[in-house]
Amino acid sequence: PPRMFRRTLALSALLLSSTSTAVRLNRRTMAAAASTAMVPMTGADMLAKTRWAVVGDALNTAKPAYRVAEKLRDAGKDVVVVNPRAKPDVVESGQAVLSLRDCADPPVDVVDLIISPKIGPDIIAQMAELGIPAVFIQPGAGTDAIREAATSAGISVHEGCVL
């Protein structure tokens, strides 16, 4: 359908423009991204999903990301901590991963974005590449550019606090 084709083209343009090197999408990745675009999710739909990636400083007990990860775990969710700034010993210990690519198996259902908006566009590009269908953007983590990139890639967006 023309709608799916436009979204696939928008996804390709987003990925090519959001990285310094050209990103090539294989047909399966493009099809996954296009298919997720067809099923928008609400915040309630997202909260019903089981595998979450919390992108932020979720190991620091003084940070809101820590409380978000704990609340999701308490609700029975499988939570992976993604911290692009994690130190090598944290990554080696398995407490966190550096990118969404490092926690793709099993697939992540929802990303909770609770990190600097400067890092957000790269996270959205990773989500599009991996076919992750939904992002829950915490207050202070979103920008118009992040919301537009997610929407253009067919990623469902919900803004608010998981707590």
Image: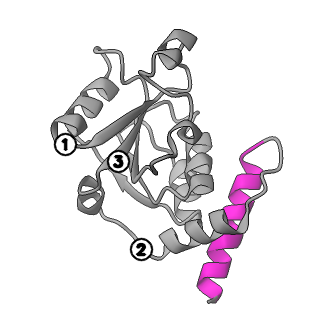
Residue of label 2: 39
Residues 147 and 82: in front is 82
Indicate the position of residue 55 as horizontal and vertical percent values.
44, 34
| Residue furthest left as drawn | 74
* Mark 1 or mark 2: whose residue is earlier in sequence: 2
Q: Which residues are magenta?
A: 2-19
Question: Could you say where residue 124 lies in the image, as x and y percent from the top left?
Answer: 56, 48
Q: Which residue type carries mark 1?
A: Gly
Question: Magenta span: helix, strand or loop, mainly?
Answer: helix
Helix, strand or loop at disc 3? strand
Question: Which amino acid type is shown beneath numbered disc 2?
Answer: Val
Cβ–Cβ under 8 Å for marks 3 and 2: no
Residue plotted at (65% across, 67% down): 28
Name the quadrant containing residue 44. bottom left
Q: Is residue 103 magenta?
A: no
Asked if the residue under mark 2 is in contact with the one under mark 1, i.e. CB atoms within 8 Å, the reply is no
Q: Position of residue 151 (x, y in %)?
A: 52, 63
Task: Say which label, 3 or 2, has the lower sequence index.
Answer: 2
Q: Residue 154, percent across and down?
A: 53, 66
Q: Residues within 10 Å of mark 1 (few under 14, many from 20)?
A: few
Precedes in sequence: disc 1 or disc 3: 3
Residue for badge 3:
51
- Identified at 16% across, 35% down, the residue is 74
